[in-house]
Amino acid sequence: MDTYDTVLVIAPHADDEVLGCGGLLADLATAGSRVHVLYLSVDGMSHYGLTTPVTYEARVAEIDRVAKLLDFEYTIAYGDRQLNERLDTLPKRELVDLFQEHLDRQRPDLLLLPSGDDYDQDHVATFSAAFAAARPIGRSFGKWLVPHVMSYEMSKLQWANKPLALCTAFHDISDHLDTKLAALREYASQHRPAPHIRSEESVSALAVLRGAEIGVRYAEAFEVHRTLL
């Protein structure tokens, strides 16, 4: 695995980082990388499949447990603001400024974004603004140019109205799938039984498929936007 001193993961919601790159995050922590997750919207709300509403405090407690398990730091941009599934109502300029500030302050070697092909409007809005923030402005102009920019995927992307982008970067998570699934279970408000897309079976199936593409048992795959060799 390439060595990254600092990694920034942008997650529209609390669980996206686990579904998309939980195995990689576990491996990065083992390698000594500093990982920071920037969550956009964290809200208390009613979820289908649950009998009682989930509070904001309960969601933050879930994040705390996952952060401890995967050994990352985190920031919540919009906490308890009722913006879940409404991030597309925010001005794009506001989101771009938010992401630029984090890039310039944290200076990550690797930036991990949600897929822009997602049907979820929050993911699309997040990707669009974060991609703009990562545009190639040289460091000589006072901005941090992230050398490696990629998008993570999850099984729900198969519901798409256009051909999906080709994933050309892979990471072997054979030693970390169990940790990824344990992190998913810590998001009890989001965890669902099969055949739901957030079930352990669905997450494992995608890992098996991606693993077969590179000759290992389990893997995660990424769409590459920029990488400096």
Image (cartoon, rainbow, N blue to C red):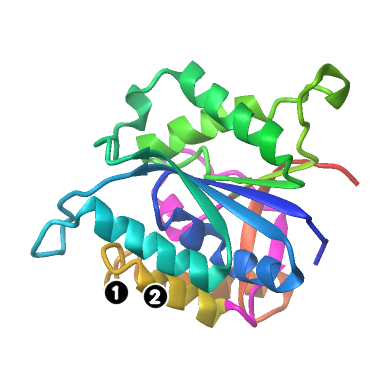
Place residue 228 in its image quadrant: top right
Residue at image coords 18%, 55%: 47
Label 2 crowd bin: few (<14), some (14–19), many (20+), radius 10 Å: many
Nearest the viewer among 176 and 119 is 176
| Horizontal relation, residue 16 to residue 213: left or right | left
Magenta residues span 152-176
Nearest the viewer among 201 and 104 is 104
Residue at image coords 35%, 66%: 187
- Mark 2 or 1: in front is 2
Residue 114 is situated, as x and y percent measured from the top left of the image, at 52, 45
Amino acid identity at mark 2: Glu
Residue 208 is situated, as x and y percent measured from the top left of the image, at 56, 76
| Mark 2 or mark 1, earlier in chain | 1
Q: Is residue 213 above or below residue 221?
A: below
In reply to whether residue 162 is colored magenta, the answer given is: yes
- The residue beneath circle 1 is 194
Q: Is residue 204 visible?
A: no
Give yes or no for contact between labels 2 and 1 (Cβ–Cβ under 8 Å): yes
Q: Main secondary structure of the magenta part?
A: loop
- The residue beneath circle 2 is 200
Amino acid identity at mark 1: Ala
Q: Quadrant of the N terminus?
A: bottom right
Q: Is residue 11 above or below residue 132?
A: below
Q: How many marks?
A: 2
Place residue 156 in its image quadrant: bottom left
